[in-house]
Amino acid sequence: MPEKIKHIIKETVETIVIVLLLVIFIRATICEPRWIPSSSMEPTLQIKDNLIVEKVSRYFTKPHRGDVLVFYPPQEKLNPTLWGKFTRLIGFFGTDEAYIKRIIGLPGDKIKIVSNVGVYVNGKLLKEPYIKEVFKGYCLPEPEMHCGPLTVPKDSYYMMGDNRNDSTDSRYWGYLPENRIVGRAFVIFWPITRMGLIQTPKYN
């Protein structure tokens, strides 16, 4: 094989390896793309929305109430192998199912869900302009459902979908441990007609 061809192949392989390492680094530490498979976050997020999940803010601050997070729910048994850990780190190739919901309760918050009324946090009805409609179902007593009154434990969060009547969230599976968070949904990049930042609401 001529030296020129060997050199071209060597440079091509090196370029591919560098690009792959950069992609892995970016997805593991900075951000990764995700898409929405269900209606549980409507109207904020629609089915087939493509978004960027950022992972940088977690190094500097704790999640805030109202943040939309991607995470692995506590009832999901995660692949314990090295490959499973790697695929979760980069958010690709894995079989572990991730959810996306909004933080309603922070550690130490007292939560109570009242059907046809809304969510009480620390005794105050939460103003939620982002939801599709209030929860109209029945809040069953523990352990069937987790509607409160309850207090969110340390290093845990109470998560709910914006589509309250079509979301499997903390009402059904309890608290989200902090170590299962992937990152914060930051921006919708596709389709173009829905492109924009995913805002965290300001609560009074």
Image (cartoon, rainbow, N blue to C red):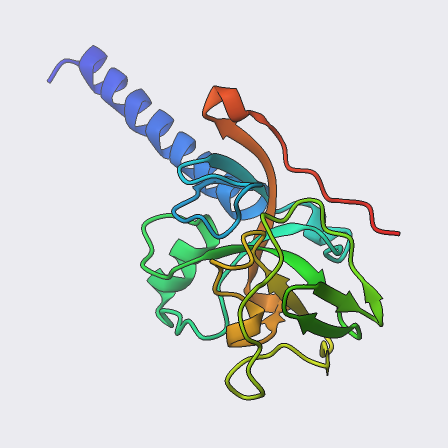
Q: Nearer the viewer, residue 38 or 188?
A: 38
Q: As displayed, is residue 127 above or below residue 156?
A: above
Q: Quadrant of the N terminus?
A: top left
At 51% across and 20% down in the image, what residue appears? Answer: 193
Label count reads: 0
Inspect this view and state whether residue 53 appears.
yes
Image-based side of 153 in relation to 188, left or right: right
Q: Position of residue 197 (x, y in %)?
A: 64, 31
Q: Residue furthest right?
A: 204
Q: Position of residue 204 (x, y in %)?
A: 89, 52
Q: Nearer the viewer, residue 15 or 38?
A: 38
At 71% across and 81% down in the image, what residue appears? Answer: 150
At 42% across and 71% down in the image, what residue appears? Answer: 76
At 80% across and 63% down in the image, what residue appears? Answer: 125
Q: Nearer the viewer, residue 143 or 153?
A: 143
Q: Position of residue 189 (x, y in %)?
A: 51, 27
Q: As displayed, is residue 110 above or below residue 160?
A: below
Q: Position of residue 157 (x, y in %)?
A: 67, 68
Q: As displayed, is residue 131 above or below residue 81?
A: above
